[in-house]
Image (cartoon, helix red, strand yellow):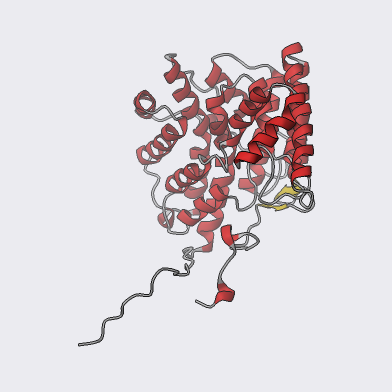
């Protein structure tokens, strides 16, 4: 293959498809869902509104509002399967993959190549809607608690918190988590979204595409960082210790979780939204909540200064994971549930991308450049 056709590592800067679902403008520190500023949506709109935008093409009232509540209940037998999976699988993301496949199989949700537009839409809504139910059930089973059935009368974010913790969350906690979910529904052709689209391009079923995307999300360089960020804050303890901690980490060649991004060179707008969400939620929690936010802000400032001194020719910014960890911690979710919570929102974006990719009707099949030893070519007999 000619050298000029070789893409850069990680396909950086290469557009591999057309999409109407959104985009990320890293130099500007801006991202959008369809034609709407995504950060503004996170500040002003509900998750159901944004779900409607991504699947129905417009915000309410210009499109019929999606109601995921009626789709959250697991079909007969799948709850027992999730319980059995949770008994032998510690990682909730493993059980999530089992659960998604089980729902699709039980309900006969076949390959996308054979599904009508209406059926594929129903697959997208149904399978994204059961994600919090599966995750919360796994979590409670691991703790030895009975599962909490979904309540279709309350919002998706609040019901996820209620099913996971066993108690109705405060309106402040539910709204903070909802803002996190809205801010992470979609984000360009990230690794998990691209993975889901590759699988969808083969004509596979919606469940297969979502499960493949979940696998990509489990990687700590993609969706696994919020818990590591809050653990880093715990380890550093105070802003005064941050500079020395960063210096040691850089000397060892460790990654500083929560800082730097593959696309953003300006401030990550998701982090801006979530910092404000953390401050608002902390104000309702008293001294402990406000102390965490103050320490996080101070540590963030010191880490940014240390990174600027380390690489003065680059702008390394705080990414969404840093303040996501703080928000989810303040909301009372256990750290093992941080990455799974990411999948609650991103499954909405994945399913919209699957629908879009299926409409393309062409398999994604790039080439690779062979760089091994020259093969031995046998002479014809």
- Direction bottom: furthest residue: 381
- Direction left: furthest residue: 381
* Position of 375 relative to 105 (above/below): below
Does 37 sit left or right of 212 as displayed? Answer: right
- Front residue of 13/134: it is 13
| Residue 84 shows in the view | yes
Report how many numbered discs are placed on residues in the image: 0
* Position of 359 relative to 284 (above/below): below
Does 260 sit left or right of 208 as displayed? Answer: right
- Front residue of 40/303: it is 303
Does 38 sit left or right of 84 as displayed? Answer: right
Residue 324 locus on image (x, y percent): 67, 32
Residue 154 locus on image (x, y percent): 61, 23
| Residue 49 shows in the view | no
Residue 95 locus on image (x, y percent): 42, 32
- Front residue of 221/54: it is 221
Residue at x 42% of width, y 50% of height: 205
Residue at x 56% of width, y 34% of height: 344
* Position of 27 relative to 235 (above/below): below
* Position of 366 relative to 242 (above/below): below
Residue at x 47% of width, y 67% of height: 368
Residue at x 75% of width, y 17% of height: 291
Residue 63 locus on image (x, y percent): 68, 44
Q: Quadrant of the C terminus?
A: bottom left
């Amino acid at each position: 293959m000619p050298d000029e056709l070789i893409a850069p590592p990680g396909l950086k800067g290469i557009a591999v498809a057309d999409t109407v679902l959104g985009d990320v403008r890293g130099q500007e520190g801006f991202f959008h869902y369809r034609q709407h500023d995504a950060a503004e949506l996170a500040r002003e709109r509900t998750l159901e509104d944004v779900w409607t935008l991504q699947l129905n093409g417009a915000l309410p009232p210009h499109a019929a509002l999606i109601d995921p509540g009626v789709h959250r209940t697991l079909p007969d037998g799948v709850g027992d399967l999730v319980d059995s999976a949770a008994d032998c699988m510690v990682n909730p993301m493993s059980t999530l993959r089992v659960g998604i496949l089980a729902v699709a199989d039980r309900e006969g949700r076949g390959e996308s190549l054979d599904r009508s537009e209406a059926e594929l839409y129903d697959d997208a809504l149904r399978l994204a809607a059961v994600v919090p139910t599966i995750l919360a059930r796994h979590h409670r089973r691991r703790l030895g608690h009975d599962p909490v059935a979904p309540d279709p009368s309350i919002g998706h974010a609040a019901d996820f918190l209620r099913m996971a913790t066993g108690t109705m969350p405060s309106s402040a906690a539910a709204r903070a988590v909802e803002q996190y979910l809205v801010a992470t529904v979609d984000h360009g052709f990230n690794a998990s979204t691209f993975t889901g689209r590759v699988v969808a391009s083969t004509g596979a079923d919606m469940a297969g595409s979502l499960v493949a995307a979940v696998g990509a999300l489990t990687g700590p360089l993609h969706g696994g960082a919020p818990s590591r960020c809050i653990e880093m804050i715990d380890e550093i303890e105070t802003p005064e210790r941050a500079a020395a901690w960063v210096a040691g980490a850089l000397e060892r060649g460790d990654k500083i979780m929560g800082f730097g991004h593959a696309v953003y060179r300006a401030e990550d707008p998701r982090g801006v939204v979530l910092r404000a969400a953390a401050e608002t939620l902390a104000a309702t929690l008293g001294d402990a909540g406000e102390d965490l936010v103050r320490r996080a802000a101070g540590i963030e400032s010191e880490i940014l200064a240390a990174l600027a001194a380390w690489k003065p020719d680059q702008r390394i910014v705080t990414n969404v994971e840093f303040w996501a960890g703080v928000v989810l911690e303040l909301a009372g979710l256990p750290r093992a549930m941080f990455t799974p919570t990411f999948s609650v929102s991103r499954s909405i974006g994945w399913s919209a991308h699957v629908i879009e990719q299926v409409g393309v009707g062409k398999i994604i099949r790039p080439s690779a450049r062979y760089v091994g030893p020259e093969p031995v070519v046998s002479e014809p007999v």
